[in-house]
Amino acid sequence: MDRAEKAQTVDALKADFLANTLVVVAHYSGLTVAELTNLRRAMRDADASVQVTKNRMARIAIRDTNHANLDELFRGPTAIAVSKDPVAAAKVATAFAKDNEKFVVLGGSLGGQLLSVEGVKALATLPSIDALRGKLLGLIVAPATRIAGILQAPGGQIARVISAHANQGQEAA
């Protein structure tokens, strides 16, 4: 890899670090190509991405970003998982690490805050941004639905009373 290619790689990594809220760093030593492909597919499905990095280039790229605190984690065979969603990459990385002992989560950074392994695991237990939006929308819509039901109830009750009186009148005749 010549100097120009290295500069391009560093620029691409820096763009990833700047564009994403969450960065998870892990060791991947011993994973097969098929296992890495499965990890990449799972990340892609969760709107995240994972890539194997050269430590020196990653340390250069991470400077002057919110995730500069990850510098010490780039030792050994490292891979980074990134996502704009503050939970997606952590969920996939943690789930993958449970199934594959060769994939070891080292830590992460969320918006500039350094996360330990326990922090990444705790983050993975939270619902995704889309799930939270769905719950919030449900909370907002629920009162309106209840109000509409309450407003319709008296009209329905009046109609049932009138119908009952009409039926009684027909039975008496």
Image (cartoon, rainbow, N blue to C red):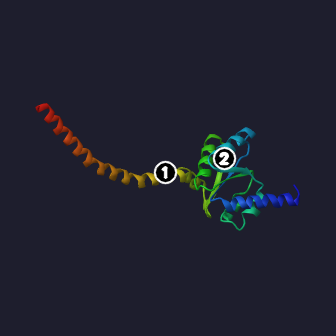
Q: Which mark is drawn over residue 11?
A: none
Q: Which of the 4 image quarters holds residue 15?
A: bottom right
Residue at numbered disc 1: 134
Quarter of the image where the N terminus is located: bottom right
Decide if residue 130 is on the left or right side of residue 49.
left
Point 87% across, 60% down: residue: 3
| Residue 37: image location, x then y, percent | 71, 41
Q: Secondary structure at mark 2?
A: helix
Q: Nearer the viewer, residue 71 or 23?
A: 23
> Above or below — where is 117 with respect to 162?
below
Quarter of the image where the C terminus is located: top left
Q: Which mark is drawn over residue 44?
A: 2
**Residue 15 seen in the current view:** yes
Disc 1 residue crowd, few under 14, some 14–19, many 20+, Cα 10 Å: few
Q: Amino acid at mark 1?
A: Gly
Q: Secondary structure at mark 1?
A: helix
| Residue 152: image location, x then y, percent | 30, 48
